Amino acid sequence: MAIALLVPTIVIFAQSTDPNKRKPPLEMANYDWQKDAHASGLTAEQMVTLHKQGFVVTGNTCRQAFFPYLNGEQLFVTSDAIANSYSVLLEESVRLLEATNARRLNTFLVEAWKVTPSFQKRFTGDPSLLQVAYNRVRMTMGVALELSSGQKVDASPDIEKAIDDEAQRVIAATGQSKPEWLGPPDAGFEAIDYTRFKPRGVYNGRPALERYFRATAWLQAIPFRFSKDEEFAAWLMLYEGLDDFDNKPLYNSEQEICMKGPGEADSMKSALMMLVGEPDDTDLFGSGHEGVTNDGWDAKGFNDLRQQWANRGPGAEDGTVHLSQINDQISIASKDGKPERTFRILSAYRLPDAAMFTDTEQIHAGAFPSGREVAAALGSPIARAFYNSDNEKLLAQIDKDKNAFAEGTLYDDYLNAMATLFEPVDAAAPDLFHSSAWQEKSLQTFLGGWAQDRHAWLLQAKQNVIMLGMGEIVPSGFVEPVPDFFNRMAQLSLKSLQIFQDAGAYNNGIEEVVQNYRDTAAALHRYAAARKIDPKARPTGADAEVLMNNEGLMYALSIPGKPMPPEEETAAKLEQMATQLETQGPGNDPELKMQIEFKGSQTAKKWQEFASLCLKLEELSNKQLHHRPLSDEDNQFYYDFGSTLASFMGYDSNEFNDVHDDAPRIADIYSAPQTGQVMEVGIGRPLVMYLLYPYGGKLILTHGAVLPYYEFASGERLNDQTWADLLKTPAAPAPPDWLRDVTSKPIPAVKPVVR
C-alpha cells in the first residue's frame, strides 16, 4: 500500500510558462497513430512490433534520458527515467560525501604518520619479528599518505624511495605482483592486482577524489592475516599504537554505531554502514584487543593470544576477527572455499549481491555470475522462470541468500523499490502492461538501475487494455502505471537526503567551488587561445555560459579602477585558488564559506524536489488507473517534464545544445585475475521507446526513454569514458541475449561470459 509523504511543495522548472508558445493540442476525432508513427520515422518492422506488443524500443539513442521529453507532447514517463534521475542525484551526493571523506582520511594519515616512529620503542619481543612488522606498518601507511596527499612522505631517503616506488606502481594501475616487503607469494596471498587501483566512477577525472580513491583502495587491499606472526604483529602495532589516536572522523566503535538512531552518521564508517552495508573485513577500529600487552611479542605469545581470541566466540564469528564473506585477493582457494581471516586498515563494505555471487560462483563452473541472479532474488518472474527450468540448484542457492536483500541500508532500500516493478500491475492497467514483453522490459529497467547503483559505490562496495474516459484532445502525457514504485522512490529520496545530510555531505561544497574555479580557468584559457587566432573571437557554447555565470568572480580578482587583467592571468589566479582551497580549506573568509554552503545545499534541495516529483507521478498514475481526467496543471506538468528532469541532472537552463554525452555508466563487480578478465555491468545511451496507450477508444502514440543494460567480460577495467568510446565502435558488446525481445531489432546471441 502506498504511504503518504509530506514533502515541501516545489516549483517545477518550466520549459515555458507561456501556454501560447505550446503547440496546439491534437484533436481526438482526427487522430491516427499510424500517421503519427510514420511522421516520427518508425520503420515498417518497428510499426509491426509496436502494433503487436504495444511498445517498441528503437535503436535511436540520445545523450540523456530527459531528451525524449523535451517537446512536451504525448509523453510516456517511464520508470527508467525516474531511476536514472535518482542515480544522478545519488552519484552527486556520493561525490560530495567522498570529498568530505577524502579530507578526513588525509588528516588521519598525516597525523598517524607522525606517531608511527614511536612504535619501534613501544613494543618489545622478538627483534626480527618486530622489525618486519614495523616495516610493513611504515610501508602501508606511507604509501597511503603519498597517494592521498600527492606528495612524498617525510622519511629517510631509503624509506622515502621505497614508498614512492610502491605509490607509483599503484598510480600506474597495471599488472599483478607481490612486492618484496610483503613477503614471498603464498597460497593465501599470491599477489596484488594493481588494476583495482584505477580510479573509476564518480572519482575519475577529479584529482582530489582520484587520490582518495587510490589511498582508500590501497588500505582496503593490504591484508594483515590472523595466522601470520609478522602480519598479526603489524596489525597489533597499528591497533595499539593508534588506540588513543583521535580517529572519530573516520570511525566509531561498532557499539557506538549500533546505538545510533536515524540521522546520526557522524563518521565516515557509520555513514557508509547506513548507506551500503556492513564492513566485510575486520577494520582498524572494529576488532577487540583484550589480552594484548606491549611486551612478549614473539611466536609463542601470538599463538597464545590467537587461541585466547578464538575461544571467546562461537564458530567463525569470534567477536574479535570475523571471516570475510567476499574474497578480493589473488589467492588459492581453501578447502571450504572461504577467505582467510584478515584485518584491513579500511574495509570495503558487503553488498548482498556480492555475498550471493560468492556462493553462486561455486555452481557456475567457470562462468561469471549474472545480474539476472539479483533480479531472481528480488522476485523477477522471468529471471526465476529461467533458473527454475535451467538450473534448479542455482535458484535454490539464490533463495537461500535472498534474505540478505531485506531492507535496511539505502542500497537495500533502492533495490527493493526497483523490485516493485516485478509486482503484478493494477488490473485496470492496459493489457500491454500485463504481457511477458513488458515484464522483460521491467527486468531491463531493474538491472539498469542496479548497474547504476553499483557504479555509485565502486570504491566502497567490496567487489566480486482498459480505456480511459473519452476526451476532446490528446493528453500531453501518460505515465507508467506503477504508483507504488513512484511512492517508494519518493520515500527513498527523502531517506537518501537524511543520511547524506547527517553524514556531512552537504555541509561543505568545497569540491563544487574548486571545480567551478577550474572550469572557469579552463574556459579562460580556451578563450585566450581563440583570441590569439582571431582577436574578435568570443566565447561560445558552454564556455560562454561558464564565463557569464562567473563574471562577478572574475571582477573580484581585478584591481578596482584598472582594466581587467589578461585572461591567462585571471585563469592562473583561479587555478591557484582552487589548489589552495582544496588543500587548506576556506580559512576565515566569510564570503567563501557562504559560497561553499550554497553549493552544498543545492543537491540537498534537489532531493526534496525529486521526492515531490515522484509523488506527483504517483498521483498521475492513479488518475490513469481510475479514469480521472487530467487538469490543466497536470498537462502543464507533462509539458515541462523534460526540463524538470534535466534540472535534476544538472541542466538548469533551457539551452540544451551543450548537453554532455555522458549517460553511459559502467562498473566492474567481479574479477578473475588468473585470466585478467573482469565482469562489467552497465548502461548505454538512453534509447527512445514508442508506446501505444489506449485512450478514448483510440491508441495514442507516446514516447519516452529506456536505459539498455549490459553485462560482459572485459580484458580491462573500464571507466565511464572508455565505455562510452567502446559503445561507438563495432567492438561494442551486445546486450544479453535474454533481453532480446525488449528491442525491435533482433540482438545477436552472445557467447557465455566465461572467466
Image (tube, rainbow, N blue to C red):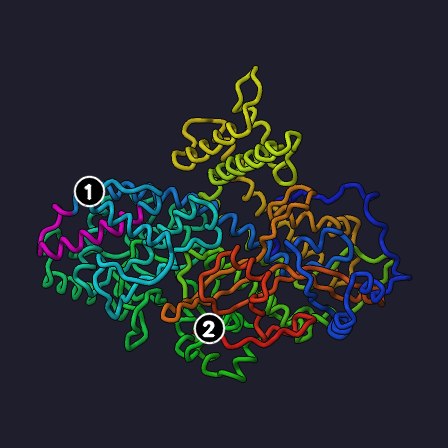
Query: Can residue 411 be seen from the camera position used here?
Result: no
Give the vertical position of 373 relative to 704 (above or below).
below
Of the residues shown, which amino acid type is indicated by label 1?
A: Ser
Span highlighted in magenta in the image: 120-145
Question: Which label sits in the foreground, 1 or 2?
Answer: 1
Query: Can residue 717 be seen from the camera position used here?
Result: yes
Label 2 neighbour load within 10 Å: few <14, some 14-19, many 20+: many
Residue 609 horizontal/vertical position (percent): 61, 46
Q: In the displayed image of the protein, which residue is found farthest to the top?
A: 561
Residue 291 horizontal/vertical position (percent): 15, 57
Secondary structure beneath dot 1 equals: loop
Which residue is disc 2 drawn over?
369
In the displayed structure image, the side of residue 178 where residue 409 appears, left or right: right
Cβ–Cβ under 8 Å for marks 1 and 2: no
Number of marks in the image?
Answer: 2
Q: Which residue is painted at 48% across and 51% down in the image? A: 202
Residue 482 horizontal/vertical position (percent): 66, 63
Which quadrant would residue 255 be assigned to in this image? bottom left
Chief secondary structure of the magenta span?
helix
Frontmost residue, 99 versus 206: 206
Which quadrant would residue 580 be assigned to in this image? top left
Quadrant in the picture for the N terminus: bottom right
Give the vertical position of 395 relative to 344 (above or below).
below
Q: Which residue is painted at 67% across and 48% down in the image? A: 644
Frontmost residue, 87 versus 398: 87
Of the residues shown, which amino acid type is indicated by label 2?
A: Pro
In the displayed structure image, the side of residue 203 where residue 612 appears, left or right: right
Which residue is disc 1 drawn over?
156
